Image: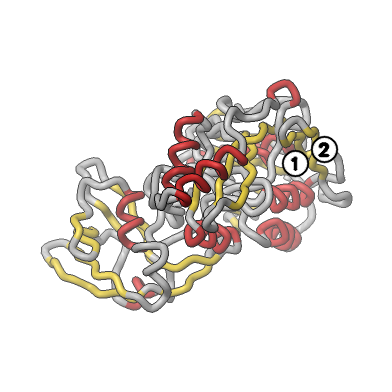
Amino acid sequence: MSGRDLFCQPRRARHGAALTLVFTSVLAAGAATGSLPGSEAETAAAPARAAAPALRHEDVARAAAEAMADGKSPVEAAERAVSRSGDRWGAVYSRGEYEELEEALDGRYTGVGLSARRERDGRIEVTGVRSGSPAADAGIRAGDRLRTVDGEKADGRPVTEVVALLRGDAHERPAGTTVRLGLERGTRAWTETVRRARLSTDPVTVRTLADGVTVVRVASFTKGVGDQVRAAVGQVPDGTGVVLDLRGNSGGLVAEAVTAASVFLDGGLVATYDVDGDQRALHAEAGGDTARPLVALVDGGTMSAAELLTGALQDRGRAVVLGSRTFGKGSVQMPSRLPGGSVAELTVGHYRTPLGRGVDGTGITPDLEVEPAGPAALERARTVLSGLGR
């Protein structure tokens, strides 16, 4: 994920999200306080690897029901069942947590609008403040040190824990509640009480470089992102090169990734997958721009739905992929409702790229491997585009 948004799962280190089929994402280090999307969606699977998981949804439902009958927590019972199954991407969410995931996929979240990272000495530093957010209104700036959250020491904690403290309990942190932040700037130390608010994300940003190359950065595939990519590319003059920046993209709704693929492909296969052995395929819409020079920029934080898009563009010969090997999240999760209203997600298969390559555990190797951080990667992308005739 970018340094702005992180979805924090408060019970165990759960990864994932869902609305239909899901492609779950990993908690990215150093990302946003008070925030958001980090999930994934419909994906693809390898016929040769598509075996039903050892743990089935009915098994988890049975464990939850038995716990309820005994007066115990159905969520905790379901979590134990999933944990023992060895399903790396399996997850259990309370009703409130799952609603939070659905909001994240809609590009909405409750938070204060600041981003943070953990420094090598364990300190938590504010890396960005969203314009117009409660944090911005309070005068908090990038570079400030976050020392405490509601009296809890922030130093030395993983960023995920700090995010959890900022957000508060899933059922007790609606917009309008307050959080007390202990801050430090140079020699000044002070406490600021900030009121949480309903915020929206900006998953697609566009900028034009000095030579006319347009960089379309996609941070996650929340609802509507595919059409946003289409609109952004539609504003670029014909024949001008585009850098599709997927660095740190944690994934999202696969339908949105397929729509983004359709911007650059004239129909055809995007990925294949299965659900408990049932083979399926995802296809691009006809009519995409197949002539525009295109570079896809990726790194180790490029995950799931973003990997699906990258694999399709690479296998179809549509883009030069530049950067470092992607994360390698290529499994499909299916959600089911449990007794008491919680939701379990279990792995049901894996996906493959158009040429049949599996991604899970291996990632996608770029056509040109370069250090993806910093301006050097964009400079290399511009060089590649010049060779493609931009």
Q: How is the image coloured?
A: secondary structure
Crowd tier of the residue under label 2, counting other residues whose Cα lies within 10 Å: few below 14, some 14–19, many 20 or above: many
Where residue 278 appears, x then y in whole percent?
79, 34
* Picture disc at residue 269: 2
Q: Is 228 placed above or below 51 here?
A: below
| Sequence order check, earlier mark of 2 and 1 | 2
* Three-letter code for the amino acid on which mark 1 is drawn: Gly
Q: How many marks?
A: 2
Label 1 sits on a secondary structure element that is: loop
- Residue 355, picture quadrant: top right
Residue at the front extreme of this rendering: 70
Q: Is 224 placed above or below 136 here?
A: above
Residue that numbered label 1 is attached to: 389
Label 2, label 1: how far apart the Cα atoms are? 26 Å
Where residue 212 appears, x then y in whole percent?
65, 55
* Three-letter code for the amino acid on which mark 2 is drawn: Leu
- Left or right of 236 on screen, residue 121: left
- Left or right of 249 on screen, residue 171: left
Say which of 389 and 119 sits in front: 119
Label 2 sits on a secondary structure element that is: strand
* Picture disc at residue 308: none
Residue at the top extreme of this rendering: 48
Where residue 42 appears, x then y in whole percent?
69, 45
Which residue does the image show at 49% across and 66% down from the upper left?
Answer: 109
Are the two marked residues, 2 and 1, in contact with CB atoms closer than 8 angstroms?
Answer: no
- Residue 359, picture quadrant: top right
Which residue does the image show at 61% across and 40% down from the upper left?
Answer: 57
Which residue does the image show at 56% across and 31% down from the upper left?
Answer: 328
Where residue 321 appears, x then y in whole percent?
64, 35
